[in-house]
Image (cartoon, rainbow, N blue to C red):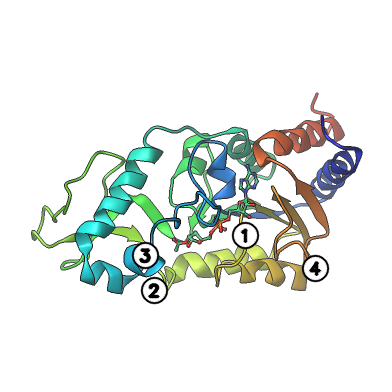
Amino acid sequence: MVSYETQLEIEQAALALVHSSSVAVLTGAGVSAESGVPTFRASDGLWEGHRIEDVATPEGFGRNPGLVWQFYNARRANVATVEPNPAHTFLAQLENLFPNAFTLITQNVDGLHQLAGSKNVLELHGSLRRTRCTVCEEVRDQFLDPLAEMPTCVLCEGLLRPDIVWFGEMLPQEIWRAAVQATTSCEVFLVVGTSAVVHPASGLIRLARGVGAIVVEANLTLTVASDPAEIGIYGPSGQLLPQVMKRLRELKGMT
Ligand code: OAD
């Protein structure tokens, strides 16, 4: 049963969306939590038991590529067993309501947004599905097929690495520029399932607020993004966001 307060926030979010002509969304690991993909910073999260410096930095990969591949092969195997949840579906449906005026910016590397049907997706932190050769730089879609413990390049036999942005590395610049462009030109900026502590992605939230967008946060709990957010929908996003869609459709006279 949804509280009266949450119902009000859902109503406000639907109203903001119905009056808007363009939407940008920033997602984080929380959007995939209900699919069974662990988040990073929960007590049983992905970093628990792993030092970030060991598994998510170029230096860690240089020291022990086998350990890093063990970590990413386990994540790939996990993602191969999961499916998009209703929060992913909500975002795919939302895109259909805003043709050519919708951008989904994600920090996630699991590809579940695309599986749910989202099309205009900017992957800020890369993808678990791709590898990059450390020698010839060739980027290859490996889907979620199992990889060797230390996979090598079919072109040059160089060691492959996951095509993921690690700590201390630059974001892909074209994707970042597109994310900034979408953020500065949207009327509603929806932030779903991110602790909003990793820069520069989290900076997009204040940027959106700064240009006058209505910021809507959907998360289990309050976060550092809650302050710039005007509307906050707190609870499991896979349960609550479909209610925003239901109300939005009613407001648009679609049901
Ligand atoms: P975090 O693990 O930091 O945060 C997950 C957020 O999701 C938290 O704020 C939770 O409260 C929220 N959450 C959990 N379950 C939820 C649910 N069912 N519905 C709604 N919200 C839920 O993950 P991110 O913010 O994505 O980067 O982390 C950002 C980046 O830090 C990641 O992309 C990764 C990591 O280091 C790299 O690996 C480069």
Query: From the Cβ of disc 2, is ligand 1 less than 8 Å away?
Result: no
Query: From the Cβ of disc 1, is ligand 1 less than 8 Å away?
Result: yes
Q: Which residue is mark 2?
A: 169
- Please give the name of the residue rendered at 22% of the width and 71% of the height, measured from the top-left corner: 62
Give me the disc on residue 56. 3
Quick one: SS at disc 2?
loop
The earlier-in-sequence mark between 2 and 1 is 2
Left or right: 34 in relation to 154:
right
- Please give the name of the residue rendered at 91% of the width and 38% of the height, measured from the top-left corner: 4
**Tag 4: Cα neighbours inside 10 Å, few (<14), some, or many (≥20)?**
some
Please state the horizontal and vertical placement of residue 15, each as a whole percent of the image: 86, 45
- Marks 3/1 in contact by CB < 8 Å: the verdict is no
Labels 3, 2: front one: 3
Measure the alpha-carbon separation of dots 3 and 2. 10 Å
Query: From the Cβ of disc 3, is ligand 1 less than 8 Å away?
Result: yes
Answer with the quadrant where ligand 1 appears in the image: bottom right
Left or right: 70 in relation to 232:
left
Q: Which residue is mark 4?
A: 212
Give me the disc on residue 195. 1
Number of disc labels:
4
Measure the alpha-carbon separation of dots 2 and 1. 20 Å
The earlier-in-sequence mark between 3 and 2 is 3
Measure the alpha-carbon separation of dots 1 and 4. 22 Å
Which three-letter amino acid code belongs to the residue tagged 2? Glu
Instruction: Classify the position of the C terminus by image quarter.
Output: top right
Please state the horizontal and vertical placement of residue 134, each as a whole percent of the image: 20, 66
Based on the displayed image, in which of its 4 quarters is residue 66 positioned?
bottom left
